[in-house]
Amino acid sequence: MQRPAPAQKTASLRALLRTEPFVVAPAVHDIFSLRLVEQAGYQSACISGAMLSYSLLGVPDIGLLTLTECVEHCRRLTRVSSIPITADADAGYGNPRGVHYAVELFEEAGAAGLNIEDQVVPRRWASPGGKEVVPVGEMIAKIDAAQRARRDSNFMIIARTDAFACESTEQVIQRARAYQAAGADMLLPIALRTEDDIARLVRALDIPVTLSAGTGLVPSPSAASLPLERLRGLGVRRVSLTTLLPGAAVAGMRRSLDAMRGGAGSGDDGGMAAEGAASLGALFHAQDQMDFEEALLL
């Protein structure tokens, strides 16, 4: 199966955001989830650092993932993907020089864009009350470094701000405008408190606003948990569904395992496992691979 080149995928994401009023990007954590997203007709996806930390290290998103681990996982996904995938670089792996290097590596790995956040390092996981953000000038320097590093102008620099946890809405808006002026292509605000926060931020910026919706990692007030149609109505241009697929996978695996542990037959999970297993060949184009192998061995 011929897949688009990286430059085609970055251009595709830009075109989506230019022509579509609302883009939904499920988070993918492995090739199973990526294939299902493609099969369901979604036109873009993302990699969540939080979900990657769970699946690779077995710990929450507490900053233990290395740059190399994240880049290599991104490469494995983008190599087999037909849709653009954005990646997560946390705070950029250091100072602006580290950001420059990270962007080079993620772009080479086939990412269509990269989240870079303004949290102080070492970062605080989840708890809104304990978060701190770097001075605006420090984040601007990182955005500038990211711009200098990318070779494809369509590669998206997504500035994430956690400032709603420690600043007023007006301060966050001023910060976001500074990020836009510095060259950010999209803004990802975390833990917005109200619908009005979203509406004001959208009105204040010319670049798209994207949200991470339905994370559910810890109890915290966040307007990002609003229904997707409401977010669209407020002017949000893109939403990443961070926990949709990992959550569904955990629930499904638990259900099947519980059914089998009780001595039941495989059908007692509602046939879910059997149905999934029967679809693997089609999901991964097994017949195409066998035909290709046979052609090569002639």
Image (cartoon, helix red, strand yellow):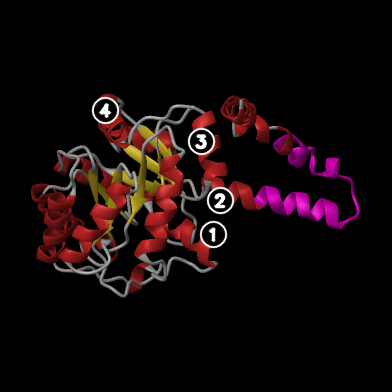
The kind of secondary structure element at disc 4 is helix
Residues at marks 1 and 2 touching, judged by CB atoms closer than 8 Å: yes
Q: Residue at x 42, y 41 (%)?
A: 79
Q: Residue at x 35, y 50 (%)?
A: 87
Residue drawn at the location 54% of the way across and 29% of the way down: 39
Q: Are the residues flagged by discs 3 and 2 in contact, CB closer than 8 Å? A: no
Can residue 47 be seen?
Answer: no
Whichever of labels 1 and 3 marks the residue nearer the N terminus, that label is 3
Image position of 280 with respect to 41: above or below:
below
Please give the residue where the numbered disc 4 appears in the rendered image.
Answer: 15
- On the image, numbered disc 2 is attached to which residue? 246
How many labels sit on residues?
Answer: 4
Magenta: main secondary structure equals helix
Q: Is residue 5 left or right of residue 168?
A: right
Residue marked by disc 1: 55
Per the model, the C-alpha gap separating discs 1 and 3 is 18 Å
- Tell me which label, 3 or 2, sits earlier in the chain: 3
Please state the horizontal and vertical placement of residue 269, each as a whole percent of the image. 80, 44
Label 1 vs label 2: CA separation?
9 Å
Q: Which residues are magenta?
A: 251-276
Q: Earlier in the sequence, mark 4 or mark 3?
A: 4
How far apart are the two marked residues, 3 and 2, measured between alpha carbons?
12 Å
Q: Badges 4 and 1: C-beta atoms under 8 Å apart?
A: no
- Asked whether 295 or 8 is in front, the reply is 295
